[in-house]
Image (cartoon, rainbow, N blue to C red):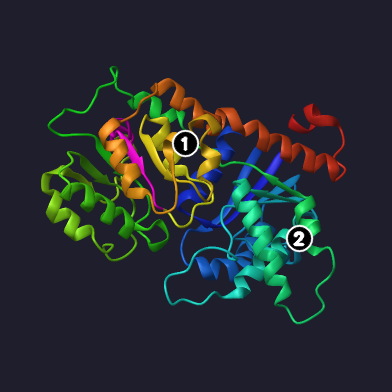
Amino acid sequence: MSVWGLEPFFGGSHRYFLEGLATHSVHDFRLHTLPGRYWAWRMHGGAVPLANADADEDGPAPAVLFASSMLDLPLYRALAAAPVGRRPALVYFHENQLTYPLPEGARRDLGYAWKNLTTALSADRVAFNSRYHRDEFMTAATSFLKRLPDCVPEGLLQSIATKSVVLPLGVDLRRFDSFRPAVESSPAPDEGPLILWNQRWEYDKAPGDIAEALLTLAKEGLRFRVALAGKSHGPTPPGFQLLREVLGGRLVQFGEVEAFADYARLLWEADIVVSAALHEFFGQAAVEAIYCGCRPVLPRRLSYPELIPPEARDAVLYEEGDLIPALRAAVRRGREWSLDWQRTWVARFDWGAIVSRYDDEIWRLWEKAGGKGGRVDAQG
């Protein structure tokens, strides 16, 4: 079946996701995208150039639209050529502008929140990457609508809830397999375990808390090495320069690892992956590290509990304020369970395991819109 993937912010995790879906889906995806920059402008105006470009598209209209929540879907549908604008649309929420945490002192522009809501209303199906994300979005939307002066239709949020579904992010985990060491090794006693922090160097990932925890353990005399492997979009986070001075040669990575092969080898080499994030709607970085054998030290909040099976949560999720003791315990004891069992926690997110859920949602959307001929005929 022909599906158009609409993404006005085709960069980073958005690009990785859409390319993965297009590669693994049984459907014939054609990607209609804009470069991944100027996110605010993409939310305001990205629908216009996409609709204009799509009007010149050769061939038949798609059966289904698969759009990112960064797209102003009502505007796109209004401007798109008539057959395209009437096609059923699934909108995928990677994040939302109702609850995305802001830097200290910043004020939320509720215009973007309203765009998220109208896009969800316009869609025929609304998908969220975690239950946490869906529930937080609906709670925040309820509060947001109470702030509007008048003329808010009854049942507006119920209509979104009724057509919503949780579709965890697909991740290409199998590509890490070719970099797995032939023999699993333990850290040398004189070096200690390798602690990995592989998140963006931005305020919402709490880099200051990570630096404080690592500096505390270093002052206690614990032996460990550190890899700070996230992408940086601005100044070095507070505490990182001091961490660099204190750790010296024990800091084996400082900044983004650009080549995938090098990144994969680093994940297999690392022993512990840690997070102190204030915002996480899924947790791709943690999923990849867990798959490669890193013992997770994650907060018991946000979407993280959904990544870990109930029987393992007490061992790897820490309570509010317990980052330092949790990381200390992990450094001292390491992983006390098999790598093969740990990999099963997150293997369900590999595209090979999860893509059928996406494909089925697309089929159902097409059939509900009156698609005829059956799935075999449509696929052919």
Residue at disc 2, secondary structure: helix
Tag 2 near tag 1, CB within 8 Å:
no
Q: Which residues are magenta?
A: 264-276
Judge whether 188 appears above or below 197 on screen: above
The answer, for residue 26, to whether it is visible in the render is: no
Residue 162 x %, y %: 79, 51
The label on residue 357 is none
The residue lying furthest to the top in this view is 183
Residue 239 x %, y %: 23, 61
| Disc 1: which residue | 314
Q: Give the distance between the C-alpha atoms of the residues marked 2 and 1, in whole angstroms.
A: 41 Å
Magenta span includes 10? no
| Disc 2: which residue | 122
Magenta span includes 271? yes
Which amino acid lies under the numbered mark 2 shown in the image of this protein?
Ser
Circle 2 packing at 10 Å, graded few (<14), some (14-19), many (20+), is many
The answer, for residue 310, to whether it is visible in the render is: yes
Which amino acid lies under the numbered mark 1 shown in the image of this protein?
Asp
Which quadrant does the C terminus fall into?
top right
**Residue in view at x 58 percent, y 39 percent:** 21
Closer to viewer: mark 2 or mark 1 = 1
Q: Nearer the viewer, residue 280 or 75?
A: 280
Judge whether 319 appears above or below 39 on screen: above
Residue 76 occupies which quadrant of the picture? bottom right
Residue at disc 1, secondary structure: helix
Left or right: 259, with 288 as reference point: left
Which quadrant does the N terminus fall into?
top right
Circle 1 packing at 10 Å, graded few (<14), some (14-19), many (20+), is few
The residue lying furthest to the bottom in this view is 149
Left or right: 137, with 86 as reference point: left
Judge whether 246 appears above or below 190 on screen: below
